[in-house]
Image (spheres, rainbow, N blue to C red):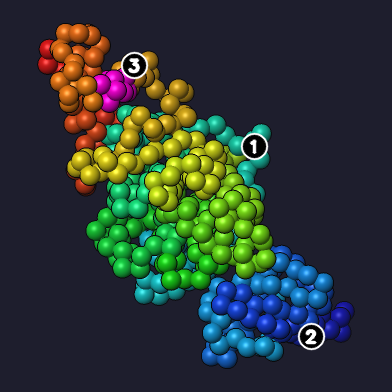
Amino acid sequence: MRAWRLAAFSLRTIPRFRRQGRVSSADMLSVRVSGFRPPCAIGDRLHVAAAHDAGVLAEIVSVSRSEARAVMFGETDRVAEGTGACLDDRAGLLIGPGWRGRVLDPLGRPIDGLGGLTDVLELRQIRAAAPPAATRQRLGPPISLGVRVLDAFCTVREGQRLGLFAASGIGKSTLLATLARAAGFDTIVLGLVGERGRELREFLEDDLGPVGLARSVVICATSDAPAALRREAAYTSVATAEFFRDQGQRVLLLLDSVTRFALACREIGLAAGEPPATRGFPPSIFRELPALLERAGPGGPGAGSITALLTVLVEGDDHDEPIADAVRGILDGHVVLDRRIAEGGRYPAVDVLRSLSRSVPGCLTAEQAHLAGQARKALALRDEMAALVRLGAYRVGTDADTDRALRQAPRVEAVMHQARGEVSTLEQAFEQLREALLNAPH
């Protein structure tokens, strides 16, 4: 028996077998590797031993009979033909409660200068399936986002996924910063995908603040990061939110932006040899989007929920472009930010008539639904008659509904306007809407 134990101990001290290969060619985004036995599979991770450090992480994205192509999570400027590569046998991230209050890169490494992570408990897979559709819970009660126009016209329920659609420079990131202060959530996970590096500290110090950061996990990959790292930022954000959801917590996932995630996927797909199909996007992006977004929402029995608010950068104000159209079909609602409204000075610049929350019929009282419907009707009729009013072709008294809409619409607009930093509640939003509709001047 003693000899058997000694032999077992000796076997454990032998270094594990490492599957190794070499780089056969490289470009700015990826490398080709060969020599692995058994061959690599799509999704495998490996370390490419660059000359200046221990190695750069890469992921296999395509395989052929003799070679595999891997996209790099770092730079390829020092990788040459013949460089060694070895398979990474530990896939996933060690996530724990100690992630709260920290700023991390997509590989789980702290970038806030506060030292190493503590309380790391569980190895989580970055790529995972959504909870089974037949067993995941239904949406929860309505929640207050602190923004009157959203609470009143696009009411969100716990576990819902809502998209914020806008072109550049209309206030998506500013609105997202306001939403990051929403109460009623145990943990906030903020994923910054391809964002400007200078904005990170401004967001942390001015918008989140010490109190907000203490209950948040921030995952950041700036615009100069490699495409694989930008794509990984979105998956790491969702995996982190899933960890806290599985602890029974109510999680708010803020992802900025889905479009930059799609652009990173496009770079990777083209590097892997996929054909550019719909407006230059390879077919795989339309598999990646639902695989990412379906993971948010309510969990299974006994789990918490992930309420997801995701920004979508609409190129050229074209809301029918492929990514916006695909995301809109996956999510549970969409909020449209309009440049014309922003230029008119109203914040948030939400176009109520083009925005929709699919959960509204199941979460509003009869009175609240009536108020929202009356306000929408007033805004729609005001917009329809705007040209005639400007030309003086419409006379007061011609139509009672139009007269009422012209009185109510400016008061509804005043309710929708909200100063930056001002916080509201769901009840306050509908109370102010009631006053605007019932107390309009005659």
Q: Is residue 259 above or below residue 152?
A: below
**Quick one: label 2, few (<14), some, or many (20+) residues within 10 Å?**
few
How many marks do you count on the picture? 3
What span is colored magenta in the figure? 375-385
Identify the image quadrant of the C terminus. Answer: top left
Q: Quadrant of residue 211?
A: bottom left
For marks 2 and 3, the one nearer the N-term is 2
Residue 177 in percent (x, y) is at 31, 51
Q: Which mark is residue 10?
A: 2
Numbered disc 3: secondary structure? helix
Distance of mark 2 from mark 1, alpha carbons? 48 Å
Mark yes or no: residue 128 visible. no
Residue toward you, 196 or 131: 196
The label shown at residue 305 is: none
Main SS of residues in magenta: helix
* Image disc number at residue 370: 3
Q: Position of residue 227 (x, y in %)?
A: 53, 67
Q: Look at discs 1 and 3 and give the one toward the viewer.
A: 3
Give the answer, above or below, for where 277 lies relative to 202.
above
Residue 133's label in the rendered image is: 1
User: As shown in the figure, which amino acid type bears the numbered disc 3?
Assistant: His
Left or right of residue 315, residue 304 in this image: right
Q: Earlier in the sequence, mark 1 or mark 3?
A: 1
- The image shows residue 345 at horizontal and vertical percentages of 19, 42
* Viewer-side residue, 79 vs 51: 79
Q: Is residue 280 above or below residue 268?
A: above
Task: Give the crowd class for mark 3: few <14, some 14-19, many >=20 residues within 10 Å.
Answer: few
Give residue 232's position: percent from left, percent from top. Answer: 54, 63
Report if residue 405 is visible in the image: yes
